[in-house]
Image: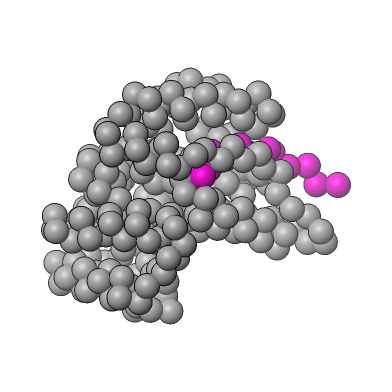
Amino acid sequence: MHGQQRVGIIGGMSWESTALYYREINQQVGKALGNLHSADVVIHSLDFNLVSELQHQHNWEALAELLIISAQALERAGATAIAIATNTMHKLASQVQQAISVPLLNIIDATAQACIQQKLTKVALLGTRFTMQESFYREGLALHQLEVLVPEIDAQDDIHSIIYQQLCKGVIRDSSRQQFLAIMRDLDGHGAQGFVLGCTEISLLISPQFTRHQLLDTTVIHTRQIVQHLLGCQK
């Protein structure tokens, strides 16, 4: 019998991407362990309507409280590590980590390591307006000597709207994909070696099937980090 570490996942932001997390994690565990093995995870799914309202009100204090309550509940449920299944809310990662006694599996650190492994030094960051405009994500990558590009402001607004008005609702439009690809071509022209899909919903729209660009899918990257902990490969 293979014992697993238990990971607590704060999800629901949106549930579309949390569903991807759950599938990815279980597929990876099944592949690693074989037979009928699945992942030992506990998921607390938040109401994304409330989260989105607080985000757009810039009420990060209330959001931090939500995440901390969730993380502490997951720790009490036996989780030996916590994962926040969204990029944007990693703005509050340090506050969550300070409030728990188990590791927080940080999506930004994992993404930086993936960039380094692929020998990338200059990447473009795509995500919500919060992720692209605020410094927490860019600074997190810069700590690993990565140069980070972001789209022009108008393009950021387009990406943000597509994420919240379409992808978070499971709406996939080819016209929106073409908008993304046009933005990516522009960033490619400015020297981007790879593209950090810094919102866990973007992979619903953009994948290697649609572009030759080097993609860093943060959902896949983060779930690999989670599975490493589950299987005892990461303490």
User: Quadrant location of residue 127?
Assistant: bottom left
Q: Residue at x 47, y 30 (%)?
A: 67
- The quarter of the rendered structure image containing the C terminus is top right
Q: Is residue 179 above or below residue 140?
A: below
Residue 175 visible from this viewpoint: yes
The image shows residue 234, relative to residue 190, as above or below, that is: above
Which of the two residues, 134 or 190, is positioned nearer the viewer here? Answer: 134
User: In this view of the protein, can residue 196 be seen by the observer?
Assistant: no
Instruction: Estimate the x, y position of residue 158 in percent, counting from the top left.
Output: 22, 60
Q: Is residue 203 left or right of residue 21?
A: left
**Magenta stretch?**
1-12
Q: Let me know if residue 8 is in the magenta part.
A: yes
Q: Quadrant of residue 167?
A: bottom left
Q: Is residue 81 left or right of residue 91?
A: right
Q: Is residue 215 magenta?
A: no
**Residue drawn 51% across the image and 44% down it:** 12
In the displayed orientation, state which residue is furthest to the right.
1
Where residue 80 sits in the image (x, y, percent)?
Answer: 63, 32
Residue found 30% across the figure and 65% down from its top: 194
Residue at 35%, 53% in the rendered image = 164
The percent position of residue 234, horizontal first and vertical second, equals 59, 41
- Of residue 3 and residue 65, the one placed in the foreground of this image is 65
Query: Measured along the vertical axis of the image, is residue 6 above or below residue 196?
Result: above
Residue in the foreground of this view, choosing between 23 and 114: 23
Indicate how the structure is coloured in the image: one colour
Instruction: Look at the picture and state if 85 lies above or below 165.
Output: above
Residue 55 relative to residue 98: left or right: left
Q: Is residue 123 left or right of residue 11?
A: left
The x, y position of residue 40, in whole percent, is 71, 43
Q: How many discs appear? A: 0
